[in-house]
Amino acid sequence: MQTIEIEALQETALQSIAAASSSKELEQVRIAVLGKKGSLTQVLRSMGSVPQEERASLGASVNTARVQLEEALELRASELKALEQSAAIKAESVDVTLPGRSQPIGSEHLISRLTREIVEVFRGIGYRVVEGPEVETEYYNFTALNAPADHPSRSQQDTFYVHDRSGTESRVFGESEVLLRPQTSPAQVRVMENDELPIYILAPGRVYRRDTADPSHLPQFTQIEGLVVDKGISFAHLKGTLEYFCKEIFGPERKTRFRPHFFPFTEPSAEVDVSCGICGGSGCRFCGGTGWLEILGCGMVDPNVFGFVDINPEEYSGFAFGMGVERIACLKYDVPDLRMLLEGDMRFLRQF
Ligand code: DAH
């Protein structure tokens, strides 16, 4: 080994150090030169076999080379470290001038909001809120509401019955079949059975019917039932109450009318219409040319219903009403199709 060779080795190593483009690469260069099996380390190890007279000068050149290479390595290491640090900072930096990504905030669904608004109107005049079960018995839904045994809505075509797993036999509770309530009216019976008189209640909740969804039907929707039982309650109270409710919900300019109708649990019974908000009552496509929109059913509690819950009809009288919230929402906001309320289209829902 000659001094000149050591100088060449040093020169190549210095080039590699300068060319290293990352701390990792630089470390590999260091290992290749100064590591246990590095090129310069091997020269140092072979010093024993160098003749005595050359040893001192050769040893000096190897040492100089080692010191210079170590210095070069250290210098390049700190250069690379600085470069790598500033690259990392750049990669992690945030452009604070970019517009932010906003998280859309959800809002109460139109049906929940309208249900709450209707409930508030009645709470303001002294009603309290009760809830009946959605899975009901035929007794509460039909029998105790004075529906005759052959009433068509009792049929399997109109009402969902809860069947045994076999699918053939119906579930029975006590003597009564189990069903998904098609109306909130059974809540009336439960309240009259359990609560003290007088009664001023509202019973909102989900109901189920064997209907296919179309513009005016949904297989599941929301109803609000109302019931008053007190001494001296007359049809005039019913009219005044529902007129007040209509003006609160639809606006003071809207008129109401009561049309005679039939419900098994009320006598007399009526359907209530509100004047059309689009044409103001003169007749248009939205109201089918009549100027009126049907919004609910109502009537004076039938004495036969009082018979099922042991209330004396000579002493007490009452009225009841039931409305579909989805239908009222459509009439209030001129929505042409009930299904739009359930589709979850944000362009539609954002309007309310
Ligand atoms: N339950 C009736 C229905 O679903 C609505 C109704 C009508 C409720 C008259 C009442 C009432 O309480 O008195 O069509």
Image (cartoon, grey):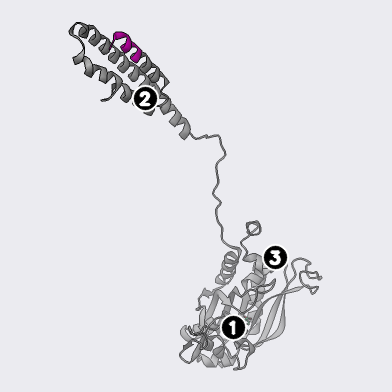
Q: Is residue 280 in sight in this rendering?
A: yes
The amino acid marked with disc number 1 is Thr
Secondary structure beneath dot 2 equals: helix
Instruction: List x then y, in percent, for residue 180.
Output: 54, 80
Verify CB contact (< 8 Å) between mark 2 and mark 1.
no
Looking at the image, residue 337 sits to the left or right of residue 120; the answer is right
Which residue is tagged 1?
Answer: 159
Instruction: List x then y, in percent, for residue 271.
Output: 69, 80
Front of the two marks 2 and 3: 2
Q: Residues within 10 Å of mark 3 (few under 14, many from 20)?
A: some
Secondary structure beneath dot 1 equals: loop
State the residue at coordinates (63%, 73%).
218
State the residue at coordinates (50%, 78%).
133
Secondary structure beneath dot 3 equals: loop
State the residue at coordinates (58%, 77%).
208
Q: Residues within 10 Å of mark 1 (few under 14, many from 20)?
A: some
Q: Quadrant of residue 349?
A: bottom right
Mark 2 within 8 Å of ligand 1, using the beta carbon: no
Compare residues 346 and 316 and report the one nearer the observer. Answer: 346
Question: Mark 2 or 1 closer to N-term?
Answer: 2
Q: Is residue 150 magenta?
A: no
Which residue is tagged 2?
Answer: 26
What is the spatial separation of the Cα atoms under label 2 and label 1, in whole angstroms? 81 Å
Verify CB contact (< 8 Å) between mark 2 and mark 3.
no
Region of the chain picked out in magenta, as a range: 1-9
State the residue at coordinates (81%, 73%).
289
Which residue is tagged 3?
Answer: 335
Q: Quadrant of the C terminus?
A: bottom right
Give above or below for 313 relative to 282.
below
